[in-house]
Image (cartoon, rainbow, N blue to C red):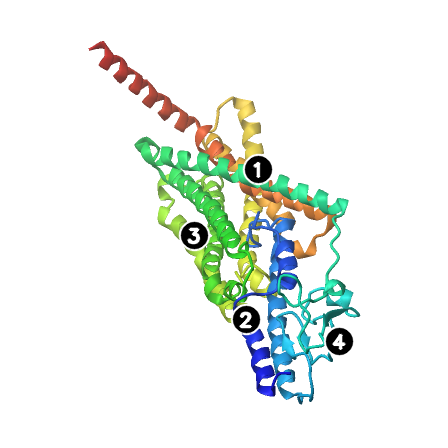
Amino acid sequence: MLARGGRLRRHVAATDDAHAALNPAVWRPLEISAPKAQFRESQSGEQRAPENASLFSSLKILEQTYRKWLQYKDDCLRRLEQEPYPSGIMCNRTFDLYACWPDGQPGALVNVSCPSYLPWINKVYQGVVRRRCGLDGQWAQEENGQIWRDISQCEEEEEITTQELWFKQVLLSFRMLYTVGYTLSLISLISALAILLSIRQLRCTRNYIHANLFLSFILRATAVLAKDALLERHWSREISKHNDLKDMLSHRAAIGCRVAQVLMHYCVLANHYWFFGEAVYLHSVLITSVLLENNKYLHYLCLGWGTPLVFVIPWILAKLLKENKECWALNENMMYWWIIRLPILFASLINLLIFMKILRVIFSKLRANNQNGYPDYKLRLAKATLTLIPLFGVHEVIFIFVTDEQTTGMLRYVRVFITLFLNSFQGFLVAVLYCYSNKEVKTELQRRLRGWRRGVAKCYGQ
């Protein structure tokens, strides 16, 4: 028999062991259920795949479970301290990091209800976890020296269905699409940007706007991929200790992915507003007939890089003061979500209106050209830009009011596929239309290639 002080020291010591070993019965199922970070684009204009939504849902469950576990632990310790100690030989009351155990009668099987912090408690609320108290007043042990405990009634049944296997295959396909699209876009955009900046003959307001659009796509892709990497690094750690989980859920640990989240929102907004700048420039050339020299480049810089700050800064303050949780990836209050989404909606709608207006002008010019056979220079100038406006604006307008939380079933997969495809391959299409298929660019590249060949021939001829 242990003295009262001995029993108290023992149960407190067991509690302090939470910093040395956290029982995997709770955290391991949660860790397994939280998928690895893939496709983590956000609601600000990047599509979150279904896997991403389930990821953040699992992470939210993990954090909520941890908070409930802390409350359960505190309530247990308080109850163990307040209950009077019985006389005679008894198995020691304790909290073993999983359940709260009262004093046990020697030779008895002690049952306690499944812990209330379990995420699946509604399914196992009638279940119990068991320990056996030995005749000597010690809890029965297994062969490896650990305290024997039966938690089978409190475990969640895991069934892998055909639908889940299909879901996993779809996610793998989306990931391949996502990775190929952004990789191809980055390579093509970087080379296209280098071409526009290195050839002096191509330096004009129109190509400067194109170059900034390329840069916004590069930053957007880089920010999204960097956020993905930070989220995966942050959430894919193995949970083996109490401190691991505590550190994982701390604000300090989330700083890196929050910064990446902010940069991603800024880059996505900048990308949308450089598209807006392209549309405004095209409108000024075709509709208002403003000369190229009168288009102030500084105005476009303020529109493309300055406007996003007007919305990102209030969003940061709202998240910091009201929803300072995890990596700021969840949208609990949709009002804060609209701080980022509303300016994207505005730019998309204006782009769509400009597209419709320009389309009417293009049709009228085509009819006129067919009559007199005289090609319009402005029409040729607008071709590449015109091709991109519907590609950018239409799908945004269609899906802009529909969030991941609001879509289910096949509609969700259709939305994910369309937005993932367009968002990831859009940079590649921009580079092709604005650079590689541009007649002016091809002419300058061919001229430089001929000059290089003449130089090589002259060098070897000497």
- Left or right? Give the position of 139 relative to 39: right
What is the C-alpha distance between the residues marked 4 and 3? 78 Å
Neighbours of disc 1 within 10 Å: few (<14), some (14-19), many (20+): few
Residue 124 vertical position relative to residue 397 in the rendered view, above or below: below
Q: Earlier in the sequence, mark 2 or mark 1?
A: 2
For disc 2, the marked residue is: 17
**Can you name the residue that lies furthest to the top here?**
461
Q: Earlier in the sequence, mark 3 or mark 2?
A: 2
Judging from the image, what secondary structure is the residue with disc 2 in? Answer: helix
- Who's the residue at 59% across and 49% down the image? 47
- Who's the residue at 48% across and 66% down the image? 251
Residue 128 position by quadrant: bottom right
What is the C-alpha distance between the residues marked 3 and 2? 56 Å
Residue 356 position by quadrant: top right
Q: Look at the numbered discs 1 and 4 and tell me whether their residues touch, using CB distance below 8 Å.
A: no
For disc 1, the marked residue is: 359
Q: Position of residue 427 (x, y in %)?
A: 50, 39
Res. 291 visible in picture: no
Residue 107: assigned label: 4
Q: Look at the numbered discs 4 and 3 and tell me whether their residues touch, using CB distance below 8 Å.
A: no
Q: Amino acid at mark 4?
A: Gly
Q: Look at the numbered discs 3 and 2 and tell me whether their residues touch, using CB distance below 8 Å.
A: no
What is the C-alpha distance between the residues marked 3 and 1? 24 Å
